[in-house]
Amino acid sequence: MHRAHPLIPALALAALAAITLTACSSGDDDGGRPTKSASASTSASAGPTTTPPTSSSPSPTDESSTIPIPSQTPATQTTDAPPSDFPATALVTYAGWDASSSSLQAVGIVSGTTDASGTCRFTVRSGGTERSATSAAVDAASSVNCAQVSFPRSQVASGSWTVTLSYTLGGKTVTSEATTAEVP
């Protein structure tokens, strides 16, 4: 009895994989859906298996199946410089009365930096009264989040209060626009 060379099944499998990959990487962008032309048979053949010859000239699909490699320098860079060195923006994302804790609460974000070594300070004002509180600065993917602060009823009277967020980093400060919150 004659046995087949042990590399023949491995070569057959490699050829099948190459054909499948070639069919799947055609120049058409089909959104990842399988196409009818990208089919392969898995039946065994009694005869020897050969791989198709390779060509030294590129086929029309070679260019479109190339995966682009991003450049070393991204188009939009974030920097960790002080706010005066780039256009950082502070924003109060929420300011409002929380009835369950009887407090005026505020949360904010600073875009334009991911350096969380600065200080977040929320300031509330009504008439001649001003209160402020600092919160933790937490780096996010493309910004700094300023954790929630609470001003209890004992610190804020009923009425309209303006809320601002200031972020200080490296001796420089950026301040948000004022947001109004109502205390019942």
Image: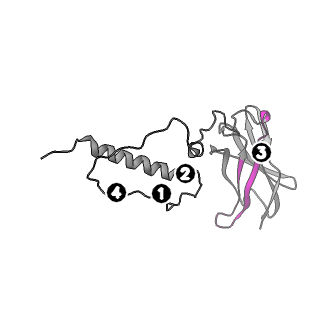
Q: Secondary structure at mark 3?
A: strand
Q: How many marks?
A: 4
Residue that numbered label 2 is attached to: 26
CB of mark 1 within 8 Å of CB of mark 2?
yes
Instruction: Say which label, 1 or 3, has the lower sequence index.
Output: 1
Measure how far apart labels 3 and 2 are at the Cα level.
Answer: 45 Å
* Residue closest to the eye, 110 or 30: 30
CA gap, disc 1 to disc 4?
13 Å
Q: CA distance from mark 4 to mark 3?
A: 59 Å
170 shown above or below 92: above
Q: Estimate the x, y position of residue 119 in percent, counting from the top left.
A: 70, 40
Look at mark 4 in the image and give the residue it sits on: 42
Q: Which residue is mark 1?
A: 38
Q: CA distance from mark 1 to mark 2?
A: 9 Å
Q: Which residue is mark 3?
A: 89
Q: Amino acid at mark 4?
A: Thr
Query: Was residue 44 drawn as part of the magenta stretch in this picture?
Result: no
Which sits in the foreground, 107 or 61? 61
